[in-house]
Image: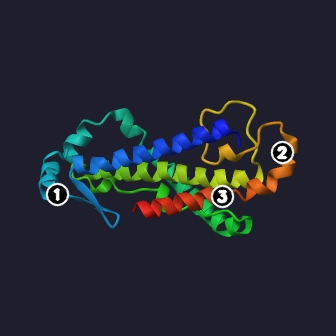
């Protein structure tokens, strides 16, 4: 890998860790803690949250008619999403051991925790649950697809992408056929960084 690119990747990882640390500091600012994966607010904060709940009658009365009319369409995306979740999870459990690719941990991507917020009414909690699941699912599937692409077709695109996935940095330059033929098997096995990141994460906890 180009040294300049490797340096940029190292800086990005360092900045990502700093961001995670800053977000963790917000726990103290809003008086909550994580206890075995569950969010715990202080009693005084819970009581204050209860006073901020918007009652269902007011929430529905103030809702935009157009927003209400879109409900069947947004929730109509859920059945195919559930099918995709099942299909992709089954795929990685069957195929990744064959390819020698580390499995993607679903719980790292699909995070459901906003229902613990006492200032949300039941509709808002359901909406937040949906968004947390759906966006987490997209990230989860994206990571599975990225690792699959690294194994089967680790070649960069000629055109500039609006965003790049986590494994793209290991791909061969577009048009570099010699390097592709020479190092394809090596790149197909280049997942050691995932084990290192997992060890660092576990040590951090």
| Among the two numbered marks 1 and 3 on one chain, the one whose residue lies closer to the N terminus | 1
Residue 3: % across, % down: 67, 39
Q: Which of 32 and 198 is in front in this view?
A: 198
User: At 62% across and 60% down in the image, what residue appears?
Assistant: 88
Residue 92: % across, % down: 64, 63
Under circle 1, the secondary element is loop
Under circle 3, the secondary element is loop
Q: Please identify the quarter of the rendering in which residue 204 is found.
A: bottom left
Is residue 35 found left or right of 51 in the rendered image?
right
Is residue 182 found left or right of 61 in the rendered image?
right
**Circle nearer the viewer, 1 or 3:** 3
Under circle 2, the secondary element is helix
Per the image, the residue denoted by label 1 is: 42
Instruction: Determine crowd level at label 3: few under 14, some 14-19, many 20+ residues with C-alpha closer than 10 A.
Output: some
Separation (CA) of disc 2 from disc 1:
57 Å
Residue 181: % across, % down: 87, 49
Per the image, the residue denoted by label 3 is: 191
Q: Which of 158 and 120 is in front in this view?
A: 158
Separation (CA) of disc 1 from disc 3:
42 Å
State yes or no: discs 3 and 2 in contact (Cβ < 8 Å).
no
Q: Which of 117 and 187 is in front in this view?
A: 187
Can residue 73 be seen by looking at this rendering?
no
| Among the two numbered marks 2 and 1 on one chain, the one whose residue lies closer to the N terminus | 1
State yes or no: discs 2 and 1 in contact (Cβ < 8 Å).
no
Per the image, the residue denoted by label 2 is: 179
The quadrant in which the C terminus is found is: bottom left
State yes or no: discs 1 and 3 in contact (Cβ < 8 Å).
no
Instruction: Determine crowd level at label 1: few under 14, some 14-19, many 20+ residues with C-alpha closer than 10 A.
Output: few
User: At 69% across and 55% down in the image, what residue appears?
Assistant: 148
């Amino acid at each position: 890998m180009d040294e300049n690119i490797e340096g940029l990747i190292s800086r990005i990882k360092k900045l990502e860790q700093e961001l995670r640390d800053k977000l963790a500091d917000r726990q103290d600012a809003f008086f909550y803690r994580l206890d075995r994966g569950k969010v715990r607010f202080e009693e005084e904060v819970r009581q204050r949250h209860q006073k901020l709940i918007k009652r269902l009658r007011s929430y529905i009365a103030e809702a935009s008619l157009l927003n209400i009319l879109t409900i069947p369409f947004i929730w109509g995306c859920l059945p195919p999403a559930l099918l995709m979740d099942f299909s992709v999870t089954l795929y990685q459990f069957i195929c990744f051991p064959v390819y020698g690719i580390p499995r993607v941990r679903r719980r790292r991507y699909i995070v459901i925790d906003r229902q613990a917020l006492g200032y949300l009414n039941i509709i808002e909690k359901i909406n937040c649950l949906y968004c947390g699941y759906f966006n987490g699912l997209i990230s989860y599937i994206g990571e599975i697809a990225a690792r699959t692409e690294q194994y089967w077709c680790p070649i960069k695109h000629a055109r500039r992408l609006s965003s790049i996935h986590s494994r793209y940095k290991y791909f061969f330059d577009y048009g570099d056929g010699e390097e592709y033929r020479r190092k394809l098997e090596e790149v197909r096995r280049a997942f050691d960084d995932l084990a290192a990141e997992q060890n660092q994460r576990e040590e951090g906890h």
